[in-house]
Amino acid sequence: MSEPPGAAMSLAEAPPPADAPSKQLAAQRVLPLRRPGRWIATAVVLVLAAQFVHGLVSNPFYQWDRFGYWFLRPTILDGLLITLEVTAYSAVLGLLGGILLAVARLSKSPVLRAVSWTYIWALRSIPLIVVLLFLYNFSALYQTLSVGVPFGPAFFTFDESRLATDMVVAVIGLSLNEAAYAAEVVRGGILSVDQGQHEAASALGLPKGYQFRKIVFPQALRSITPNYVNQLIGLIKATSLVFYVSLLDLFGTAQTMGATYPGDIVPLLLVVTVWYLILTSVVSVVQFYVERYYARGATRTLPPTPLRKLRTTLADLRARMRREAGV
């Protein structure tokens, strides 16, 4: 049986399969967009970083052998312990004072608002070293302190010089200064809570104190935490000023040892620098996990931990190397 003319087609003239374009596109390799500026900037940063590290290691002026000698000396560790004590006491008292000042600033009482605003304005305006020196010489102004009726009899009287030890002066001075800054941090966190939360709590007839403790403040902590951790890091560094009120903290101990051993001034400063880096790094790690904890319910997925980020990066790198090897 013969076929009509034009019915038969050669194999070369046969139409391509329907999925041929998709296969051709899949076979093509997608090349990433070239970014020479990024590579140049990366190279410059790596060169500068390598030069910086080489200078630290090779420069004999740093005296790394003396750094190792001083790093864990008992006198340095004693100063570090004092730094930690002053920071811990001042952070707790400063945060408590900041909460009270923030609540007073948001109060409906004009007296409380005025007193809180004046305190914050004054303590943020006066340098911390001036506050510490003023408290250190406070006994020259008031040798005795008393508690009683104003312009009347005193119930309790005590000697100020016996109570105002170097540690007490340092903690009080840092706490007073920290409370002024913490108050604004707390106030900003409270104002960041949606107004509907306040209205819902009031509609349920909850007491004001319960509203603040259980509803408003826990939500405000998500905004308060990163800002207050910045304040806490600043507080750790501010403890170096207590040396001027005769309290030998980490920096004060290094200064004293540097006066005794003039040739070891640079290694001692490096010791102080490394210890401050360690302290602030620990605080930053704690900050990450506290923020992650309070992010529950506010975000769909919690941010990955640094270890999980490292694992993901290594897995992506291995997958990319396999793809490159396959091509």
Image (cartoon, rainbow, N blue to C red):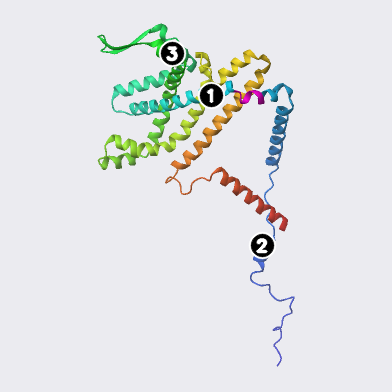
Disc 1 marks a residue whose amino acid type is Lys
Mark 2 or mark 1, which is nearer to you? 1
Disc 3 marks a residue whose amino acid type is Leu
Of marks 2 and 1, which one's residue comes earlier in the chain? 2
Identity of the residue furthest to the bottom in this view: 1
Of marks 2 and 3, which one's residue comes earlier in the chain? 2
Where does the image place residue 145, in percent across and percent down from the top left? 34, 11
Magenta region: 68-73
Of marks 1 and 3, which one's residue comes earlier in the chain? 3
> Disc 2 and disc 1: Cα gap in Å?
58 Å
The residue that label 1 is drawn on is 237
**Crowd rating for badge 2 (residues with CA inside 10 Å; few <14, some 14–19, many 20+):** few
**Crowd rating for badge 3 (residues with CA inside 10 Å; few <14, some 14–19, many 20+):** many
Please state, as top left, top right, bottom left or bottom right, where the N terminus lies in the image. bottom right
* SS of the residue under disc 3: helix
* SS of the residue under disc 2: helix
Where does the image place residue 233, in percent across and percent down from the top left? 51, 28
> Disc 1 and disc 3: Cα gap in Å?
20 Å
Please state, as top left, top right, bottom left or bottom right, where the C terminus lies in the image. bottom right
Where does the image place residue 202, in percent across and percent down from the top left? 27, 39
- Tell me the tag on residue 26: 2
The residue that label 3 is drawn on is 135
Identity of the residue furthest to the front in this view: 74
Where does the image place residue 158, in percent across and percent down from the top left? 34, 11
Mark 2 or mark 3, which is nearer to you? 3
- The structure residue drawn at horizontal position 67% and vertical position 66%, both measured from the top left corner, is 23
Q: Do the residues labelled 2 and 1 touch (CB within 8 Å)?
A: no
The quarter of the picture where residue 37 lies is top right
